[in-house]
Image (cartoon, rainbow, N blue to C red):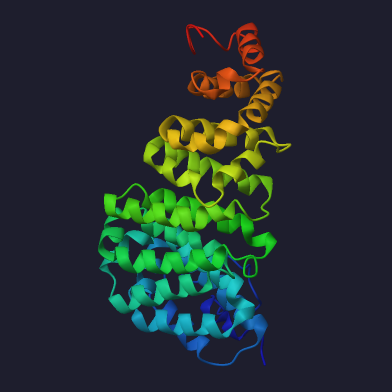
Amino acid sequence: MNTNQFLYFRDIKNDVKPQHEDTFSAPADALFFQKFVKHLLTPHTDACMAECFTQFDAHCRLPLQAQRFLADPETISVFKTYFEKNVRFQPVLATCLVHLFENKSACLFQKLESQVTDDILGLIFDNLIQHPKLILILEQIWENKKLIDLNESNYLIKFEEYLYKAQSKEEVRQQQLRDHVGGVCSCLSILTQLSLQQQAKCLQLMQKYVFKILLLHVPNEELIQVLQFIQIQVLSDPKICCYLVQDNFCETLMKFTDSFNTEIQILSINLISLTIQHYPESLSFYKAQMDKLASTILYIVSGEDDLALSRIAMDVQRLKDGPLRATLQFDEIIKVLIQKQAWGEGVDGEY
């Protein structure tokens, strides 16, 4: 079988030899996707299909072509079926889809036929575990808040199903964890900016799944990403602190204060201080941990990281009138902060 049979997409009248992969006779050819669908429905060699998808990717990057692709239910249906049946080409096709939505095609989503949106969402959610880059499409779609309002139930139900799979050790391979954690945090960050009803649902998702990610053995970079996400949510809505005392989360944060990574230590201490400040009932656990917490704080403030010093000073300020003052290390902590000019009028006038 001729591996170059897909070259009719190129200008082969003047040059019958294969041209550069970025060379097209008509980059905005209105008939491209008709030819594309025909090609998907007939047998071809792998080399020929690879050539086909190279050109498909280039067309996905063109806004006008992206609109044409999304506007045709038959094209979407054929593409979805081919994607599901051809595992070998799924990685490159997933990349093509991401490129399709990077040119702001997501804004067209609410104008598409319901069958098209259902097919696209079904393809994304059904394959997120194997191809986590697809979550970038959800971020693009969800940035348009009107789409969430129109499809809230559908989105959140499917997203919860995805989270349930994604937080399972058996289904998420270690090398995929970075994409899953980043995508979950990014999408939930977008969702929490919406209506109160959706915020409440997102809090439930955070409690059920995001917090559980911290219980998995995740690399430091991903752990920091999750802690930062939770920190941002707490600062925007302190009521979230009541969730930070459930499901052994207090014990988890204290465990992170023993980390060899200073950023993880600081983020954990920050969440602990915020929890104590906004949810005093948490002292039933943290009161017995104050000596250990004070030792970690003293270790950090005694270091050379000025930025870490200023961040920890804010946590000390939150805790200074509570059980931290009763620790043996408290006076030494304040002494070091004063010596390094991190405790004064800019932080707290007296102690």
Residue 76 location, quadrant: bottom left
Query: Could you tell whether 35 is left or right of 54 in the image?
Result: left
Q: Is residue 62 above or below residue 260?
A: below
Is residue 15 in view?
no
Name the one closer to the observer, 216 or 72: 216
The structure residue drawn at horizontal position 41% and vertical position 43%, both measured from the top left corner, is: 240
For the N terminus, the image quarter is bottom right
Query: Could you tell whether 231 is left or right of 213 in the image?
Result: left
In the rendering, at what x and y percent does residue 318 appear?
A: 48, 23
Residue 221 location, quadrant: top right
In the rendering, at what x and y percent does residue 262 appear?
A: 68, 32
The structure residue drawn at horizontal position 67% and vertical position 45%, both measured from the top left corner, is: 220
In the rendering, at what x and y percent does residue 68 appear?
A: 36, 72
Name the one closer to the observer, 32 or 133: 133
Q: Is residue 194 above or below residue 107?
A: above
Residue most toward the right? 260
In the rendering, at what x and y percent does residue 218 appear?
A: 66, 53
The structure residue drawn at horizontal position 39% and vertical position 50%, both measured from the top left corner, is: 190
Q: Is residue 120 above or below residue 81?
A: above
Name the one closer to the observer, 24 or 1: 1
